[in-house]
């Protein structure tokens, strides 16, 4: 239950807009998605048209609780999950976000003008509260130090969910070849879904919580206010009424971008008819600088429900905690029916400034520096983005990009991520690498993914030979105009695309190849698949060292004969794992275990059934003689699995001092390990560890239970 409680408390703080597409936001091929960071991005884009089908991004960040990535999926061990790193402060802050870009489309009308229509759904929450209060809400007050006292004068929790319907226009307003400027604006119709906030009404009368350890009771005082709006249901039958119910507003995004283009001539080419073209599908800048302000605006909500909680109360049983703060307020402090008081509220958007610098280091390699700064603060009924600074190296081409951002956020969390764009699909995270490798646990987790349909700009000249691809007969290889862009490397009058011997002149009737037998194997070069290596006719003139009828150049195991169905590789033990991949080629095993026998649960149980019967002299690590036969049986089992590693674990009952029991369990585990290695088991396959009395399997209150707890286990190490 603790794991569930912590997850609900952290996630119930909601979803706040942050920069959730780290890496992809700076990609020059992100198309319509670029307007999220800066509306000026869509003009002079590398895309003529870009249609986004769907994308979603999420961020969870806080300065209170850090959890290891693997613990998020450890549903069987709640205590392990609760062992995450905690950092308490007077004002701990929590930020989470969801941001979905729905069906949206961008059009580049011409070189200087572009428009876009976008739909977007967003969810926003910020929470600021005393970390000790959050700790007690999660773990409960019972067990805290006597007369624990918490003063909370600025608790703020607000949640906002809304839809956006935007129209973007961007234009180039200066282009003198080297210096290039463009600007954009997005006008947004805002549709409110839900807005709520919880706050201390009077900071001079703060929320006070005192805990009496002896009586296990709480004394609280103060006044809290909770305001929430009616939810937008999305019911089609009620859509018009709900949409125009007053829960609407307007927003605006503004942006400007400067590009320094010192090598403009590199992107101008001449076709065979002499006409000059600008290669519109290539980036032209060496340095790009962008500045934007987003989410200027607000949404007006009518008849929001207001509930006031006078939390001045003493003698509250502490066992009513842990729980969500709102549930606790309703369950303890709300008397009678909820208040029917209705008020009109205005929810302010999370206005932010974004600054971006993109450096084209060399050809397809870039480095991007981006910062997102929230203008609004932590207060009721106002959204605030998560402040971030990111440094992102990326490799970028038309159909593929890959990024690896380094991110520092406003909660003092450092993270390292990765992302990619492959055709219509893009996905990534600004924290996935650091979350996977961190030994301390992470306070920041984010992820994004989406699908779009791009239509690229321009007439390309892939081979840079001055002939555009649509009239170039060899668009991937440079060649002269006289042959429509196709080379003739050996000058034999046969173009390389038709010449089977591009480096050796030969007759047209022989497809440009000279007649001959270079390797002297009796097969003419025009029929010899290996003209420089002698080989038999059966393998088309290619050598076959293992004489299995498969030429060495396609034989995956040229020095060991094997059948054609395994590409010439043998499988000695017949376990379907080829010898070259088989870690136990003489013993049949499983594919999952790389050709080695696999330790099954039944074998593991047999090992521990034997291990639990090993006897030691009382209070010592010396093995009794009557256990030798059992140990020999264990050795026989271990030798059947030469590729598997095991750990010998020692356990004791709780009788005696804990330190003594720990040393005894260590000694006994080592004694078993030493015996096994001395009698033929590879020492690199074994390790040992003593757990003392820490892992009982039965009650230590009974003689039978203590006997069960005094045991040795031999367990498979899963790698």
Image (cartoon, grey):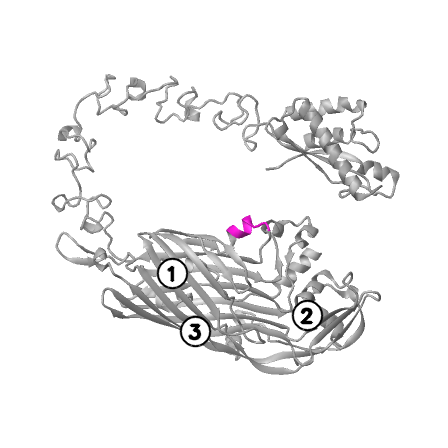
Q: Residue 563, how many percent across, how many down?
A: 43, 21
Residue position for label 2:
326
Q: Is residue 84 above or below residue 552?
A: below
- Predominant SS along the magenta part: helix
Q: CA distance from mark 1 to mark 3?
A: 18 Å
Q: Which comes sooner in the sequence, label 1 or label 3?
A: 1
Residue position for label 3:
188
Residue 716 appears left or right of 143: left
* Residue 436 shown in magenta: yes
* Residue 665 shown in magenta: no
Residue position for label 1:
51
Q: CA distance from mark 2 to mark 3?
A: 33 Å
Q: Residue 649, how many percent across, how many down?
A: 72, 36
The crowding category of the residue bearing disc 3, from other C-alpha atoms within 10 Å (few below 14, some 14 to 19, many at least 20), is many
Q: Is residue 75 visible?
A: yes
Nearest the viewer among 501 and 148 is: 148
| SS assignment at label 1 | strand
Q: Is residue 47 visible?
A: no
Q: Residue 158, how many percent across, how many down?
A: 59, 72
Which residues are the magenta region? 433-439
Q: Are marks 2 and 3 in contact (CB under 8 Å)?
A: no
Q: CA distance from mark 2 to mark 1?
A: 42 Å
| SS assignment at label 3 | strand
Q: Which comes sooner in the sequence, label 2 or label 3?
A: 3
Nearest the viewer among 336 and 316 is: 316
- Disc number lying in front (2 or 3): 2
């Amino acid at each position: 239950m603790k794991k569930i409680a912590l997850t609900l408390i952290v996630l119930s703080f909601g979803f706040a807009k942050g920069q959730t597409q780290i890496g992809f936001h700076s990609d020059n091929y992100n198309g319509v998605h670029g307007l999220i960071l800066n509306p000026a991005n869509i003009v002079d884009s590398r895309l003529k048209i870009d249609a986004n089908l769907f994308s979603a991004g999420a961020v969870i960040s806080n300065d209170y609780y850090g959890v290891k990535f693997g613990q998020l999926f450890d549903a069987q061990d709640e205590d392990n999950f609760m062992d995450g790193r905690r950092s308490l402060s007077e004002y701990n802050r929590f930020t989470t976000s969801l941001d979905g870009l729905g069906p949206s489309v961008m059009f580049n009308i011409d070189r200087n003008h572009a428009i876009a229509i976008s739909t977007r759904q967003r969810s926003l929450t910020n929470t600021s509260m005393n970390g000790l209060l959050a700790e007690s809400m999660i773990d409960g007050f019972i067990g805290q130090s006597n007369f624990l006292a918490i003063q909370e004068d600025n608790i703020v929790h607000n949640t906002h969910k809304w839809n956006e319907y935007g129209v973007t226009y961007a234009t180039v307003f200066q282009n003198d070849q080297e210096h290039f400027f463009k600007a954009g604006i997005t006008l947004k119709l805002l549709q409110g879904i839900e807005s709520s906030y919880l706050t201390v009404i009077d900071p001079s009368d703060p929320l006070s919580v005192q805990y009496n350890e002896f009586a296990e009771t709480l004394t609280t005082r103060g006044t809290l206010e909770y305001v929430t709006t009616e939810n937008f249901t999305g019911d089609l039958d009620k859509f018009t009424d709900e949409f125009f119910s007053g829960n609407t507003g307007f927003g605006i995004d503004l942006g400007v971008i400067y590009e320094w283009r010192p090598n403009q001539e590199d992107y101008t080419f001449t076709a065979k008819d002499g006409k000059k073209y600008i290669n519109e599908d290539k980036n032209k800048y060496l340095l790009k600088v962008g500045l934007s302000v987003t989410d200027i605006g607000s949404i007006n909500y009518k008849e929001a429900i207001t509930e006031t909680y006078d939390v001045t109360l003493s003698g509250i049983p502490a066992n009513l905690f842990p729980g969500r703060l709102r549930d606790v307020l309703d369950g303890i402090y709300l008397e009678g029916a909820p208040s029917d008081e209705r008020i009109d509220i205005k929810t302010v958007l999370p206005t932010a400034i974004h600054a971006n610098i993109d450096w084209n280091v060399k050809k397809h390699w870039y480095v991007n520096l981006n910062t997102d700064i929230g203008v609004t603060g932590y207060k009721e009924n106002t959204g605030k983005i998560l402040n971030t600074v990111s440094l992102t190296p990326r490799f970028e081409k038309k159909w593929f990009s890959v990024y690896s951002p380094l991110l520092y956020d406003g909660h003092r969390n450092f993270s390292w991520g990765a992302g990619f764009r492959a055709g219509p699909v893009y996905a990534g995270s600004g924290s996935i690498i650091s979350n996977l490798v961190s030994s301390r646990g992470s306070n920041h987790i984010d992820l994004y993914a989406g699908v779009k349909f791009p239509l690229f700009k321009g007439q390309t000249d892939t081979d840079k030979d001055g002939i555009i691809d649509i009239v170039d007969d060899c668009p991937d290889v440079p060649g002269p105009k006289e042959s429509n862009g196709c080379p003739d490397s050996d000058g034999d009058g046969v173009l390389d695309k038709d010449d089977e011997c591009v480096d050796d002149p030969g007759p047209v009737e022989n497809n440009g190849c000279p007649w001959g037998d270079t390797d002297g194997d009796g097969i003419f070069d025009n029929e010899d698949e290996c003209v420089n290596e002698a080989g038999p006719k059966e393998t088309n003139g290619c050598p076959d060292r293992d004489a299995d009828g498969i030429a060495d150049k396609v034989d995956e195991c040229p020095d060991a004969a094997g059948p054609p169905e395994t590409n010439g590789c043998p499988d000695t033990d017949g376990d379907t794992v080829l010898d070259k991949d088989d870690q136990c080629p003489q013993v049949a095993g499983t594919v999952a275990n790389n050709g080695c026998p696999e330790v099954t649960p039944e074998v593991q149980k047999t090992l521990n059934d034997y291990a639990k019967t090993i006897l030691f002299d009382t209070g010592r690590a010396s093995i009794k003689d009557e256990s030798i036969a059992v140990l020999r049986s264990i050795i026989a089992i271990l030798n059947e699995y030469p590729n598997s590693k095991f750990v010998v674990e020692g356990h004791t009952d709780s009788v005696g001092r804990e330190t003594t029991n720990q040393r005894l369990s260590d000694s006994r585990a080592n004694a078993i390990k030493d015996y096994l290695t001395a009698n033929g088991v590879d020492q690199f396959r074994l390790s040992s560890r003593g757990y003392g009395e820490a892992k009982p399997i039965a009650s230590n209150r009974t003689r039978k239970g203590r006997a069960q707890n005094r045991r040795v286990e031999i367990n498979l190490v899963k790698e």
